[in-house]
Amino acid sequence: MKSPRGYWWTTASTTRRTARPVIIATSPAPSPASIAPIAPSLSGPDGSIVCSERTVPYDLLVLALGSITNDFGTPGVAQHCHTLNDADGAQALNRTLITRAMAVELGTQARLSIAIVGGGATGVELAAEIHHVIGELRHYGAKVVGEQLDIAVIDAADRLLSTGTAEMSARAAQTREQRGVRVILNRRVTEAREDVLVFDNGDTLAADIKVWASGIKGASACITDALPAGKRGQFPADATLRSIDDPNIFLLGDCAGCTDANGHPVPSTAQAARQQAITLAASIGLLLVGKPPLPFVYRDRGTLVSLGKAKAVGSVAAFWRADRVHAVDGAAAKGMYASLYRLHQAAVLGWPRTLAVIAADTVSRAAKPSVKFY
Ligand SMILES: Cc1cc2nc3c(=O)[nH]c(=O)nc-3n(C[C@H](O)[C@H](O)[C@H](O)COP(=O)(O)OP(=O)(O)OC[C@H]3O[C@@H](n4cnc5c(N)ncnc54)[C@H](O)[C@@H]3O)c2cc1C
């Protein structure tokens, strides 16, 4: 089914996810400019319909569809690699990791080799987290797997965290190597097979678990017959975040392809999405009273990457001067990393509920196992 403009929202997967497009009707107009069709909401293991197809009239539409994994058409990635784009993907990886670790403990498998394709923040943090999880398994009686673990992080660039500073890259590589993680640089993966990754020079790397953490593209593919998508599957927008193809549509986050009002490209990060949301909320208020939307200016507040339970590395802009960037490292950086998460929760939930969540998390950490076994 198509709307007058031909947009069609679908559930992004056939699992329990429900379709919830971000739709803002700016006024109770009797004859709205457009209608957004929404696919049925499915639930339960049998995919039963909770809410059937429906339409939402709108004058102004905000699309914040996020992104999906980009395998750049690399053969075998969809079949043989885990991805981390959503909770389902992360849970599937966790289950495979625990199952394979048990196989090593029970002696049905000699070693556990894990290859992570992509040495950006996601790949580096994942290597740290897997190392930590396998270490924690010792407390549950797993004595062997920690000694038989081989984690490799592969990147086509000549350093890890290639979009960060050289200092961050060096610190990340040093910490990975100290923990026995192999770092393979200047190598492009051209194919994933059941048990190996194939490199551009024909070499192969055997891996029981392969994770593709190498790129994203805008989630434009989740809408069929949609707005024309541009580079990296993102919908092109101008510096006010307005679609260049439809003046009634605004875009934010990973699905928006735009440069800011100063001509700087906007990265696909939560930091940028949050800033865009704040600008857009103000712009919608202005549009309602017939004024033009605000230009979006991206302010890079810095980057923090977790390197383990007690360490992180990054560069952070000074609060008083955004152009003055400070390198941060070690436990102090980890403290900042943890507080950023809490600040984000506070922005979404407010401080009273965030404090309640912090208290609940503290109790739950003491009561629950430190590794998720399901
Ligand atoms: C593993 C991982 C780690 C990351 N770590 C960081 C980090 O440390 N710092 C950082 O700044 N960024 C990080 N990012 C990036 C960050 O998560 C994204 O940039 C940010 O979430 C983008 O926000 P968004 O609102 O555009 O999209 P999302 O947060 O992805 O939200 C989009 C939502 O739209 C829904 N949706 C999609 N299509 C449809 C449809 N057709 N109908 C209805 N709903 C739909 C999706 O299900 C999703 O819930 C990370 C990303 C990943 C994958």
Image: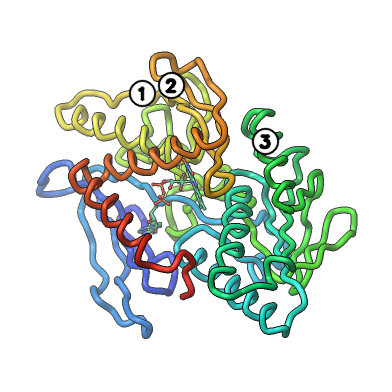
Residue at image coords 38%, 33%? 241
In this rendering, the label closer to the viewer, 3 or 1: 3
Q: Are marks 1 and 2 in contact (CB under 8 Å)?
A: yes
Residue 52 in the image, given as x and y percentages of width and height: 25, 74
Cβ of mark 1 under 8 Å from ligand 1: the answer is no
Q: Is residue 365 left or right of residue 254?
A: left
Q: Are marks 3 and 1 in contact (CB under 8 Å)?
A: no
Vertical comparison of 368 with 121: above or below: below
Residue at image coords 57%, 69%? 137
The local crowd at label 2, few if under 14, some if 14 to 19, many if 20 or more residues have their Cα within 10 Å, is some
Q: Earlier in the sequence, mark 2 or mark 3?
A: 3
Mark 2, residue position: 261
As drawn, the label of residue 295 is 1
Q: Amino acid at mark 2?
A: Ala
Mark 3, residue position: 171
Q: Amino acid at mark 3?
A: Arg
Q: Amino acid at mark 1?
A: Pro
